[in-house]
Image: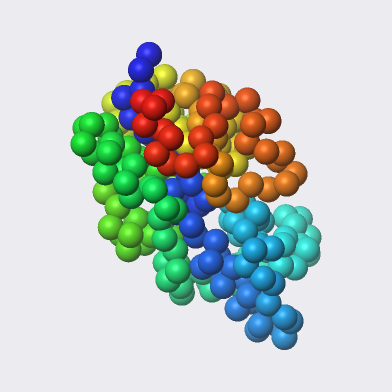
Amino acid sequence: MSSRAVLFDLDGTLADTAPDLAAALNKLRADQGVEPVPLERLRPFASAGARGLVHAGFGAKPGDEDYEALRTAFLEAYRENTCVETRLFPGIAELLAELGRRALPWGIVTNKATRFTDRIVATLGLTPACVVCGDTTEHLKPHPAPMRHAAEQLKLAPGACMYLGDDLRDIQAARAAGMRAIAVGWGYHHPENGGPRSWQADAVIAQPRDLIGLL
């Protein structure tokens, strides 16, 4: 089945949100009197959201005594400045324009909460045909439920959609839902996940315009 819609992960695929996520973490570190962590050291953790950033900045993980307090403080800092330095990755605007010319709908499936996602979508002036967030369904990626929900919103079978992501979970979710899974060469690849070519994606693209040949 040919692809009739394109779905994107948000953090690390559609938009470079790492600068604002890192700024929120470093505000929290400053409040506790510790030095900031350089942005480039934090980038690999950005796709994992609050969980990844709190671990990168404080070594805390879910289940640790101080984790929930740190996570809450981090999210509050991020809420105050959600879309200051966030930008579309180079080439994404042109890709979205090409999808529009081809009358192919596109959407977002992200583990980020609605309250942050909606602000980013509005600030960047995006007009997706559907948006599925981390609190839209009962499950997060890599579970296929968010992907299937997006296909339902588009009134398409999952197999008619392709999904682009920069994280192993993205590829796992797309494949579990029966979508074409496209790994992207840009974004926030965490070393523990291996490289995109090890994720068993249907294709790996180096830059957004490379998607055109797969449509």
Q: Is residue 161 visible?
A: no
Instruction: Identify the residue at the far top of this view.
Output: 1
Q: Nearer the viewer, residue 66 or 202?
A: 202
**In this rendering, would 97 be left or right of 57?**
left
Q: Position of residue 73 (x, y in %)?
A: 60, 72
Question: 190 or 33, which is in the foreground?
Answer: 190
Name the foreground residue: 57 vs 202. Answer: 202
- Specify how the rendered protein is coloured: rainbow
Looking at the rendering, which quadrant does residue 70 occupy? Answer: bottom right
Tell me the quarter of the picture where residue 131 sits: top left
**Residue depicted at 39% across the width and 48% down the height:** 91
Residue sitting at 51 percent across and 35 percent down? 205
Question: Residue at coordinates 42% horizontally, 71% vertically from top-left?
Answer: 84
Q: In the image, residue 179 lies at what x, y percent?
A: 46, 24
The answer to whether residue 55 is above or below residue 91 is: below
- The x, y position of residue 23, in whole percent, is 56, 72
Q: Is residue 13 above or below residue 28?
A: above
| Quadrant position of residue 51 | bottom right
Is residue 70 visible in the rendered image? The answer is: yes
* Quadrant of the frame with the C terminus: top left
Compared to 203, does 11 lie above or below?
below
Residue 80 in percent (x, y) is at 46, 74
Q: Is residue 191 left or right of residue 95?
A: right
Residue at 39% across / 39% down in the picture?
A: 209
Say which quadrant the N terminus sits in: top left
